[in-house]
Image (cartoon, rainbow, N blue to C red):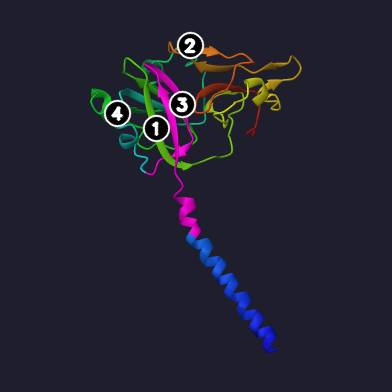
């Protein structure tokens, strides 16, 4: 009986020790920081943020960057109106949240107050040359929500090394690839001239880049 009690005490001590070690380890997990780096070209840039900044206030996240404005979708409804040309005139309507540089007179109209991970953002850089922008925060990944029968502005969870082609990424999704005619649903990416251009099946995806992706019917493809 004493042996059983002794074993029980050792067992309980082991459990307590393991629990304490785990509790001490949790803050390290929660505090893990990852840096995501973007190259912002002059004019419009379409990015997909995958980290959650510790201070996610828009004024803090975009501080010091040569940006005129930043835009993101505020609702789950998408439209094809923005596929022809990226401009503040096109975005300045219902369904968008905007952040304007504090130096601009429109700054009092700011509706984008916080920056969230797993969201696509359109940034308008005023710099004449490319700018490197690094954002540090907790890595984040969530299940994709696709709006059926509409264009969705979003990035893809792909690696920075050897990313797949659009065909290889979407070929198993009936909502994004039509196996009957062996074609992708339409996908647009922003080019250096600020124009949305349709990608081809063999074009490579890119980490941190956001696209307009047409989704036919319902989908939970990730």
Q: Label 4 crowding class (10 Å Cα cut-off): few <14, some 14-19, many 20+?
A: few
Q: Which residue is mark 4?
A: 109
Q: Which residue is mark 2?
A: 84
Q: CA distance from mark 4 to mark 1?
A: 26 Å
Residue at the outermost bottom position: 1
- Residue 73 spot, x, y in % from top left: 45, 28
Q: CA distance from mark 2 to mark 4?
A: 25 Å
* Disc number placed over residue 106 in the picture, else none: none
Q: Quadrant of residue 186?
A: top right
Secondary structure of the residue carrying numbered label 2? loop
* Disc number placed over residue 134 in the picture, else none: 1
User: Residue at 70% across / 24% down in the picture?
Assistant: 171
N-terminal-most mark, 4 or 3: 3
- Residue 19 spot, x, y in % from top left: 55, 66
From the viewer's perspective, is 77 left or right of 185? left
Q: Which residues are magenta?
A: 25-54
Q: Which residue is mark 3?
A: 47
User: Disc 4 or disc 3, which is closer to the eye?
Assistant: 3
From the viewer's perspective, is 77 left or right of 186? left
Q: Label 1 crowding class (10 Å Cα cut-off): few <14, some 14-19, many 20+?
A: few
Q: CA distance from mark 4 to mark 3?
A: 23 Å
């Amino acid at each position: 009986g004493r042996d059983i009690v002794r074993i029980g005490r050792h067992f309980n001590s082991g459990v307590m020790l393991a629990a304490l070690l785990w509790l001490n380890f949790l803050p390290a997990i929660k505090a893990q920081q990852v840096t995501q780096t973007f190259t912002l070209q002059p004019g419009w840039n379409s990015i997909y943020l995958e980290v959650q900044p510790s201070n996610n206030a828009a004024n803090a996240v975009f501080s010091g960057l040569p940006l005129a404005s930043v835009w993101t979708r505020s609702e789950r409804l998408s439209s094809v109106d923005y596929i022809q040309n990226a401009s503040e005139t096109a975005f300045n309507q219902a369904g968008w949240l905007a952040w304007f540089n504090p130096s601009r007179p429109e700054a009092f109209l700011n509706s984008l107050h916080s920056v969230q991970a797993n969201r696509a953002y359109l940034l308008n850089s005023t710099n004449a040359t490319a700018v490197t922008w690094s954002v540090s925060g907790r890595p984040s990944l969530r299940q994709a929500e696709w709006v059926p029968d509409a264009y969705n502005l979003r990035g893809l969870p792909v690696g920075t090394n050897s990313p797949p082609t659009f065909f290889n990424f979407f070929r198993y999704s009936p909502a994004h690839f039509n196996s009957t005619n062996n074609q992708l649903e339409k996908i647009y990416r922003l080019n250096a001239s600020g124009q949305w251009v349709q990608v081809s099946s063999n074009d490579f995806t890119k980490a941190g880049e956001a696209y307009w992706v047409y989704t036919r019917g319902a989908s939970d493809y990730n």
